[in-house]
Image (cartoon, rainbow, N blue to C red):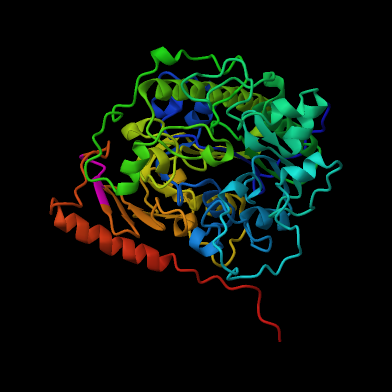
Amino acid sequence: MGTTVRESDPARPNVLFIICDQLRADHLGFAGNDVVRTPNIDAIAANGTVFENAFVNNPVCMPNRSTIMTGRMPSAHGVIFNDRSLDPNVTTFVGQLRDAGWRTALIGKSHLQHGESRAAIVDFGKTAGVRSPFAEGWDTIEHQERYEAGAVEDPDDFYGFGHIELAVGHGSFSGAHHYLWAREQGVSHEDLRSGLDPNADIAGRSPDWWQVHPAPFSAEASSTTFVTERTIDFIEHSASSDDPWMAWCSFPDPHHPFAPPEPWFSRHDPAEIELPSTFDDEGADWPLHITVIRGLEPEPGGQGQYVTPFGPTATQTQQAIAVTYGMIEAIDDGIGKIIASLESTGELDNTIIVFTSDHGDMMGDHGLMLKGGMHFQGCLRVPMVIHTPGGLPARTDSLAASIDLPHTVLDLCGVAEFHGMQGVSLTPMIKDPQATVRTEVLIEDDFPIAEVLPLLPLKTRTLVTAQHRYTRDSNGHESLYDLVADPEELVNIAVDGRDPEALRHVVSSLVDAMMRADDLTRTSPVSP
């Protein structure tokens, strides 16, 4: 389409925020992976600042995405698990940009509401402790029923986004605007909703794990293509405006089910995939729930099995990694097209590009698969790159966290923060990769379902420093790993008096970090 290129204002840059789902920090070329092919993401990294020690603040989708939106810890914004939606009255960094004149759009996965996660909502058999003050239906924007019912009326303000085109679900379990878009292309309802049915007749399904199969539709109808094309459309339409824009470009992949369409499904031969070096970890001194998880198998069972972690075989692990690499390469191809659109519209030189993920995946590390109460670095570390117009390429090993991203974007855009934000801006590290803005990262993880389905601990807290990863759960189990001497996290030095001084130090630091995370946010001034 033809566009009129707007005159750039360096003081009001565009923001392209690219976020993937369940993408590990080491599953990218720029991170040293010599199997997966990510030339376009690598190019962003080669011209930006790579944060090599970036960690989540919660290793679950909704809590950490809400943290990135608000700059607040899950215990502060209230989304502590995938069983509750982010309150619609919260202030977000996107809303701050919109109020300051930015055009804002969410293209792809939101997961700020529990539409795709309602299977996580368990009846506790008690009267609710809090009653919602919001109008009925406020938390149904991501419910698939509204998209299958006919015409959809989208809100004009969705957590600060003035425009939304949602992709709910993963692989061949597709929903929301992506579902409607694919239906218009002639893809059947059955094919778009088959991904979580272990008995669906899908050609090419792995006999070793039912979640590994090619999507029963073409790449042109995939969520990755949807996010790519709709992001490009937003960029091209925005290029003719005098206002800067912010696009939340959110790919649902490489999350399970491992079900991209061809040719991406078969890009890598599972037999050629090397197993993680820790695959045969004996699991000495683990908390009980992780030991139990490793003994589980991925039994068929539909929704209830959707996110259940387990201990995979070598074959299952190789298949999952191979297909994951294909999904990542599909995303990389899409990102290349989006960057090309920035160049063609003349927007590239005035656009901040952020690339990250909401959390990782065990993917065979320590003989474990998926996520859920496992605070190893496979789940906790994420890729993080920030490219700024005119900025110099750099890599920093100073600590960074998901909660820091909204502060950083607002800082780079010259827009004020709001009361209650709990992270820090990473701009000092962009200017000087030797700079340090934090000495630790606090990670929260809560599992309310443990009240009635006791396997996971009700609460887990982790502190990551430049040297250590310390984890303590509500069952009283402690894990402490020296990330310098033991980067593969094989020896738990919290037991048997192995390093009492290190243990005392991290426990004290964890207490301090939890006190700092205690919410002090004030709402609007009281009525006179």
At 56% from the left and 49% from the top, the residue drawn is: 120
Q: Quadrant of the N terminus?
A: top right
At 37% from the left and 56% from the top, the residue drawn is: 461
Q: Position of residue 116 (x, y in %)?
A: 63, 44
**Res 292 quadrant in image:** top left
Between 487 and 256, which is closer to the camera in this rendering? 256
Number of labels in the image equals: 0
Between 390 and 45, which is closer to the camera in this rendering? 45
Q: Is residue 402 left or right of residue 294?
A: right
Is 104 included in the stretch rendered in magenta?
no
At 49% from the left and 52% from the top, the residue drawn is: 404
View extreme (right): residue: 151
Q: Is residue 488 left or right of residue 53?
A: left
Q: Which residues are magenta?
A: 479-485
In this view, 428 is above or below 77: above
Q: Is residue 409 left or right of residue 397?
A: right
Q: Is residue 409 visible?
A: yes
In this view, 202 is above or below 250: above
Q: Is residue 386 visible?
A: no
View extreme (bottom): residue: 528
At 72% from the left and 52% from the top, the residue drawn is: 140
Q: Position of residue 136 (x, y in %)?
A: 76, 62
In this view, 63 is above or below 519: above
Between 339 and 65, which is closer to the camera in this rendering? 65
Q: Position of residue 155 (x, y in %)?
A: 79, 52
Q: Position of residue 12 (x, y in %)?
A: 67, 48
Q: Quadrant of the C terminus?
A: bottom right
